Image (spheres, helix red, strand yellow):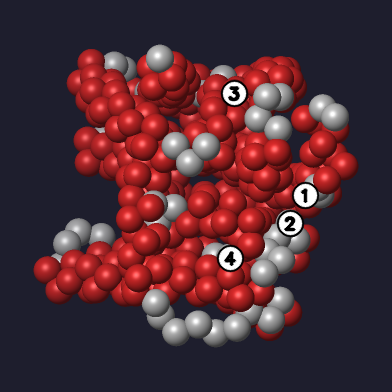
Amino acid sequence: MGYIHSIRSKSGIFLNFFNLGFIQISNIAVQLLLFPIILRTIGIESFGLVTVINAYSLLAGVFINYGTNQSGIKDIALVKDNNTLLSQLFFTIYHTRFLLCSLSVLIILALYWVDIPYINYILFALPIILAETINPIFFFTGIEKLTLYNTSNLLAKISSALMIIFLFKPDAGAYWINFYLGMGNLIFYCIVFFYAIFHYQIKWQPIAYKRVKNILKENSYLISNNITVHIQQSFFLFVLQGFSNPTILGAYSLGDKVISSVRMLIVAFTYAIYPNVAIQYKVDKANWIHYKNKMNRWLGISFILFAMGLFFGADLIVQLLTGTQNQLSSTYIKTVSLVPLFMALNTLNMIEFLIKNQYKKLFYCSVGLFLFSLLTGSFFILFIEPTQFGFYTLFIEIAAIVIVLFVAKKKQA
C-alpha cells in the first residue's frame, strides 16, 4: 500500500485539511478586512508601530509556547487514546507555559518601571501574549478535531474587528489596536481550552516539575529555532522602527502583513498534514521522499500562480487596504510576491526535521539563517534604497531553503 493511500485510508487528513483550509482562509479574509479598518483609522504611520509591537508580543508568545505548538501535536497524536497519558501531557504543557508566561509578565512590568519608549504599546499588547499562552491549537490538531477550534478562531477575529469598529477611539491612542486584537483571541481560546478539558474528560494534574523540566530540556533546540526564526522574520521590521521614518515603516509593514497572512495559510497546511505524517512515517519510511516530491510539485504550481496574482494585483491590493494609492507599498508587495512560493517549498523540509525529532538540525538552520538575516538586513539599511527593501524578505526565504538543504545533506553524510 502506497504512502498516500495509507494516509487517505487511515487518517482524517482530508477532513483535517478541509477544516484548516476553509476556515483558515476565512480567518485570513477577516484579517485582511481588519487591515483597511485599522489603516484608515490610525493611518499608515501608526500602523507601522502597531505592527512592530505586535511582532514583539508574538515573539514573547513563541518563548512561552516553548515549541509545544509543534512537539505537542505529535505527542498528543500518539497518546490521544490513553486518557491518563493525555491528561498528563496536556497539563504538563500548560504548566510549562504558565510558568514562562509569569516570567514574561514580570519582565514587562519591570520595563514599565524603567519607563522605556512606547511602554503603553507593550502593556496594551498583553492580551496577545496571554492568548498565545492559552492557545490550544496543538491539542485539537493532535486529536484531529479542528472544526471547533477553527470556528472559534474565526469568531475571535470577527470579535476583534467589531471591538475596533465600535470601541476604538482614535484620540485614545493607537496602542488600543493590539489590545482589541489580543482580547478577541484570548476570550475564544479560553472557551475552547475549557471545552477541551470538560468534553474530553482531561483530568487535572498537579504540577510535576520533573515533566516540566523534561519539556524545557527536550524542546531547547526547538524553542531556540522558533525564537531565531521569529526574530529573523521580524528583524527588518525591528530595524526599520529605529532607522527609518514612519512612512517607510508603515509601507513595509503593510507588505509584511500581506505575507504574514499567506504564512498563516501555509502553517494551516503544515498542521493539517503533520499529525498524520508523524504517525505514517513510523509505519512506512520508504515512501516519504515520493510523498514529499509529489506534494512539493503541487505546492509549486499553486504558489507560482499565487505569485502572479500578487505581483499584477499589487496596486489593487493597496487601494483596497488603505483606500489610497501608495506606490511604496505597491512596490514592496511586488518584490515579495515570490516569497510565499519559497516558504511553501520549504515547509516539508521543516516537517521532515520534526517527524524525525531532529530539533538540533532545526536549530542549526535557524542560527545560520539568523546570522544571514543580520548581515543582509544591515547591508540593506546601509546601502540599499528604501524602494528595494522588499527584496530583503525574498533573499531571506531563498537562503532558508539553501541552508536547510545544506544542513540536511551535511548531517546525512
Q: What amino acid type should be assigned to the residue bearing mark 4?
A: Pro
Query: Disc 4 or 1, which lies upstream in sequence?
Result: 1
Task: Using residue 53 as the reference point, say whether residue 244 is left or right of it.
Answer: left
Mark 3 and mark 2 lie on one chain; the one further toward the N terminus is: 2
Secondary element at image label 1: helix
How far apart marks 2 and 1 lie (CA) works out to 6 Å
Secondary structure beneath dot 3 equals helix
Assign the N terminus to one quadrant of the image: top right
How far apart marks 3 and 2 lie (CA) works out to 24 Å
**Residue at image location 53% in from the left, 68% down from the top:** 89
Q: Amino acid at mark 2?
A: Glu
Mark 2 / mark 1, whichever is N-terminal: 1
- Is there CB contact under 8 Å for labels 3 and 2? no
Name the mark nearer the viewer: 3 or 2: 2
Mark 3 sits on what residue?
345
Query: Picture quarter containing residue 201?
Result: bottom right
Q: Which residue is mark 1?
A: 16
Residue at (27% x, 70% y) in the render: 103
What residue does disc 2 label?
144
Q: Quadrant of the C terminus?
A: top left
Q: Does 341 appear above or below 138?
A: above
The numbered disc on residue 136 is 4
Q: Secondary structure at mark 2?
A: loop
Describe the element under mark 4 as helix, strand or loop: loop
Q: Residues within 10 Å of mark 3 (few under 14, many from 20)?
A: many
Q: Say which amino acid is labelled 3.
A: Leu
Check if mark 2's residue and mark 1's residue have beta carbons within 8 Å: yes
Q: Quadrant of residue 60?
A: bottom left
